[in-house]
Image (spheres, rainbow, N blue to C red):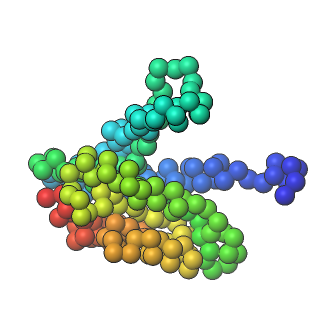
Amino acid sequence: MGTKELRKREIWQDVSGPKAGVAEKNFYEVFLEDFEGSDFKIRPNPNEFNNIYFDVKLSKNVLAEIYTPDLKKWRHGIVPDYAIDNLKTKKTLYVEVKRQDGWVEGKSRSAGRGNAHERSCKFFTPGLLEILKEHGKLGDAVLPFWVVFQGDITRDPCRVREITLWYNGYPAHFFMWRDLKNKQPLIDHFNKKLKHLLT
């Protein structure tokens, strides 16, 4: 694709950014209401990991081979969309809400070309798993996060298969929220499959 064509094409962040914000807000409002008067709390943008990369120790050899900015410190980490805390047990489950387009009726297969679902896989990496488990206090045998997918990706025949394979053995830790007008399946999934991890 040439420069002219690229300039005319919509920038994906301009289109998906606002939609993702709405998706996250919908999720937050559901659990804010559902947790009212309980021992559970939902926190938006938990910041306990917002500098975990900066604090990674590198060997002298590596440091000698990479760019080292003339700064004492800069922010470099991750911020999950939400944290669900049990205020009594002090256990935490981290949540990512991923909204993505997909290949569904009336759309071409290329409509599913986004990578939000792939970006959610960073939580499977050994280093992040260790840190999330330590902070979440859920135990070593449990994934310390939950990913909720929204949008056409939840019906895309390719993406649903990919996500199902990636989460093989951990089906409780992802949810396809297909009908945003119906919050009950989302609440039921949490209550039946995840809530006990926090007690």
Residue 26 can be seen in this image = no
Left-right relation of 182 to 103 = left
**Picture layout, residue 61 above or below residue 28:** above
**Picture layout, residue 125 above or below residue 74:** below
Left-right relation of 15 to 137 = right
Residue 38 place in picture, x, y as percent:
15, 53
Residue 17 place in picture, x, y as percent:
57, 49
- Towards the viewer: 118 or 149: 118
Residue 64 can be seen in this image = yes
Image point 63% across, 49% down: which residue? 13
Residue 132 place in picture, x, y as percent:
31, 50
Task: Report which quarter residue 111 is drawn in.
Answer: bottom right
Residue 3 place in picture, x, y as percent:
86, 49
Task: Report which quarter residue 140 is drawn in.
Answer: bottom left
Task: Report which quarter residue 156 is drawn in.
Answer: bottom right
For the N terminus, give its image quadrant.
bottom right
Image point 38% across, 55% down: which residue? 126
* Number of numbered labels in the structure image: 0
- Towards the viewer: 116 or 37: 116
Image point 54% across, 73% down: which residue? 159
